[in-house]
Image (cartoon, helix red, strand yellow):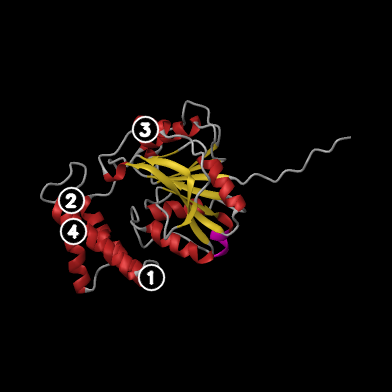
Amino acid sequence: MAVAPQTEPRTEVVAGIATTGRPAVLRETLKYLASLADVPDRVIVCTAGIEDFDGPLAEALPFSLLVVEVERGTCRQRNAMLDMIHGEEILLFIDDDFMPSEGYFDAVRRLFDSRSDVVGATGNVLADGISGPGMNHDEGRAILNGMPTPDGAQVISEVYNAYGCNFAVRASTVHAHGIRFDTSLPRYGWLEDVDFSRNLAQHGKFVRDSHMRGVHLGTKFGRARGVPLGYSQIANPLYLIRKGTMSRPRALRMIGRNLLANMVKSFQPEPWVDRRGRLRGNFVALRDVVTGRACPERILML
């Protein structure tokens, strides 16, 4: 009697989406994920209110979907999803406007199965609407459809930090060391990806995988207002310097680059960026630095 060969259990990849105020975008992204030949094993959607998810999709989904409601804040929402994974699962954080390419989830499985030293990985963003007016899902599909399937060797390189729109983490490492997103970075938690990455990188390698490819639409509505974001551009890097999760030269370069961009572009701002609001936020933060009051939570009062 023939005995079936033993096979290794497949690593489960859970896609985690934190979303606030963009139910139409979320719905289109879930429909897109369901259309892939290569899908996540589970999807967790963490909303800040039931209105952020406008009901079940008409289409049958090829993955299980769990929708949970948590107090508003990217860090709180992502921590809630971390609490829902276990064992050797991989949690892939994607923004509600990120479109992974075909093969993305299999690339995640291959990477974490083959490299026990890797604790986190971020993907290769083929196009990023965050630096322009943003894109819709049809435009994202067109970009992905126009990209050839990667036929070269998988290129894995170490990175300083993940890009928050798409990065995967190993559940066992996260839980073994109690690593969580810092809820002192409120609302959209600007630079929370840097802080989390540097904490996780103390326990293994954080890498970029060339086969984890996708498009970030950079949807503009539902994003942070100019003044609070401008404040965070100053206060958050300084906070991470004090924590030790961002090097002083890197943080100061980021502050200088954002301050200069806001000053120069405020004379003729892009239609999709509130440059003058960001600049006002920068100046409020600099005033608070001088008076010793600067801290990320101050955006809640702006």
Label 4 belongs to which residue?
A: 260
The answer to if 174 sits in the magenta stretch is yes
Mark 4: secondary structure? helix
The mark lying in front, picked from 4 and 2, is 4
Closest to the observer: 84 or 15? 15
Label 1 belongs to which residue?
A: 243
Q: Is residue 2 above or below residue 17?
A: above
- Marks 3 and 2, how far apart in space? 26 Å
Quadrant in which the N terminus appears: top right
The mark lying in front, picked from 3 and 1, is 3
- Marks 1 and 2, how far apart in space? 28 Å
Label whose residue precedes the other's in the sequence (4 or 3)? 3
Q: Position of residue 71 (x, y in %)?
A: 39, 51
Residue at screen point 52% across, 49% down: 91
Q: Position of residue 203 (x, y in %)?
A: 53, 65
Specify whether residue 298 is in view. no
Quarter of the rendering containing residue 27: top left
Residue 137, labelled with which disc?
A: 3
Mark 3: secondary structure? helix
Type of amino acid at the residue the image marks with label 2: Arg
